[in-house]
Amino acid sequence: MRIPIVKIGNSKGIRIPKMLIDRYAFEDEVEIELTEEGMVLHPIKKVRHGWGDFFAKMHKNEDDVLLIEDFFNDEEWDD
């Protein structure tokens, strides 16, 4: 795919087609990785995105149990 470089004020830029924005989940910012061959754009993923839905599903399936025993005694924290 070829896209033109356009003038934006005193700078230049590119317009990324909506199809690519949607496909790669670009939002307000992108990360640019500079390589020997050129630039690579990466979407910035929100930390813990979707965790709330995932944990709700785990709770519904009663799969939200500790995998290891809690080694703290709750009474130790009551001081």
Image (tube, helix red, strand yellow):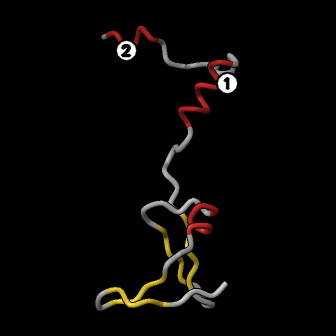
Circle 1 sits on which residue? Answer: 67
Name the spot of residue 9 as percent of width and height, x first: 29, 87
Above-or-below relation of 54 to 14 = above
Quarter the C terminus occupies: top left
Residue 61 appears left or right of 41: right
Residue 68 at least partly seen:
no
| Displayed quadrant of residue 77 | top left
| Viewer-proximal residue among 73 and 16 | 16
Q: Is residue 6 visible?
A: yes
Residue 46, how many percent across, how many down? 49, 51
Q: Could you tell me if the residues under marks 2 and 1 are in contact, i.e. CB atoms within 8 Å? A: no
Type of amino acid at the residue the image marks with label 2: Trp
Q: Nearer the viewer, mark 2 or mark 1?
A: 1
> Residue at 55% of width from left, 19% of height from top?
71
Image point 49% across, 70% down: which residue?
31
Residue sitting at x 54%, y 64%: 43
Could you tell me how far apart the alpha carbons at marks 2 and 1 are, in whole angstroms?
A: 22 Å
| Element carrying mark 2 | helix
Question: Residue 70 appears in which quarter of the rendering?
Answer: top right
Depth check, front residue: 63 or 9: 9
Whichever of callouts 2 and 1 sits on the residue coming sooner in the sequence is: 1
**Which residue: 40% across, 13% down?**
76
The answer to which quarter of the image holds residue 56 is top right
Quarter occupied by the N terminus: bottom right
Residue type at tag 1:
Leu
Q: Which residue is mark 2?
A: 77
Label 1 neighbourhood size at 10 Å, few (<14), some (14-19), many (20+)?
few
